Amino acid sequence: MKHENYDPHFPDQPVVDLYLKTWAKLPAFKSKPAFIWVEDESNRSGLTYEELNTSVQCISLRLLGSLKRGDTVVVLCSPGLELVEIIFACQRAGLLVVPVSPPDPSFAGENFHHLVRVLSQTNPKAAIAESEYIKSVRQYISAPSSNTRLSKLLQELKWIPMEEIKNNNADTMWEFKKGDECWYNGCRAEEVYLIQYTSGATGIPKPVLVTAGAAAHNVRTARKAYDLHPNSVIVSWLPQYHDCGLMFLLLTVVSGATCVLTSPNAFVRRPRIWLEIISDYKATCTPVPSFALPLVLRRGAVDQRAGSVTSIDLSCMKNLIVINEPIYRKLHLRFNGVES
């Protein structure tokens, strides 16, 4: 039998979520960091494989308390570990997830058109968002609005606060212990579990329907190409609701690796944070769009914070994955310290 995984003695799983359940039960992986979130030097948090699996199971049970298997859910959460947990929980609950960058809830100017497109095309039953975001949306709905279509679409949604489904009380934990031993009832390989919208860089964003099996096959193939394994450390600041950022979340779990995340805004504010995270965590793999390299060369080479001097060591890196075009050879040579 041909295996796409790193270990021919470890069988491939039909969906990514089954890898998470497997790792979480293995003694060598239970306490291993799966995802680490870096806001800045003093604000870092993480989830082990066991913690992530427990949280995913509890969230999925809570979601199924108000939704049914096969329902479509739009996720309007900011980047972070909570978004990671919710994306995996939707797969385990058998829900069809549509991750979207949350527009400002004032919906002023032109920032709501993509959301209208998503809600109209996917017809979700519910939306998951932070409590404060939901409060602002409800204020918008209750006030007079010139955009009656948007207001109607928002009113038709069942709004689920992220904080409520993450509240793992004793009852939910008991259900988790029972449910985790049961036969897996999450998204099956042939089922569409994700609607991924294209970036819109060359046209109006279009929905792409992704089955759970196709996503698993895609990241297993990428794992083999990048030679990722449990000792690999991935660093990513890519948007978690978009294709490559999202796929690297799945790739981490399939590989049993550790992924260190930060937000796109953190990178744009201070590009050097990307290099610092690679250096601090001795990362072996990182995906970036081509514009990141000239941005780092212009703004990231020197730490501009007053009184702070940190050295950067990128010798641990094995894979610098440029995820879009155009790719300029001169920039790559300059980034690698080679004059063209």
Image: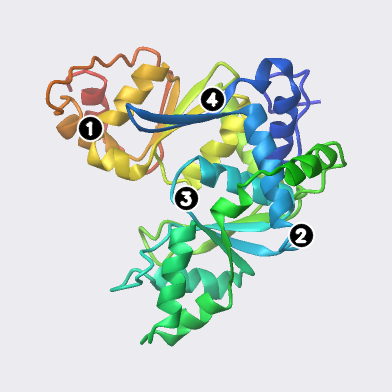
User: Which amino acid type is shown beneath numbered disc 2?
Assistant: Arg
Give x and y (percent) for residue 153.
52, 78
Residue under the point 44% across and 51% down: 78
* Residue 326 in view, yes or no: no
Q: What residue does disc 1 label?
A: 296
Left or right: 21 as drawn, with respect to 322: right
Residue under the point 23% across and 31% down: 331
Who comes first in sequence, dot 3 or dot 1? 3
- The disc placed on residue 242 is 3
Give the Cα distance between marks 4 and 1. 24 Å
What is the secondary structure assignment of the residue under circle 4? strand
Please rate how many residues cluster around mark 1, counting C-alpha atoms within 10 Å: few if below 14, some from 14 to 19, many from 20: many
Residue under the point 36% across and 60% down: 202
Give the Cα distance between marks 2 and 4. 30 Å
Q: Quadrant of residue 33?
A: top right
User: Which amino acid type is shown beneath numbered disc 4?
Assistant: Thr
What is the secondary structure assignment of the residue under circle 1? helix
Give x and y (percent) for residue 41.
32, 26
Q: Nearer the viewer, mark 4 or mark 3?
A: 4
Check contact, mark 3 vs mark 1: CB within 8 A. no
Return the residue nearer the eye: 306 or 34.
306
Q: What residue does disc 2 label?
A: 69
Q: What residue does disc 4 label?
A: 258
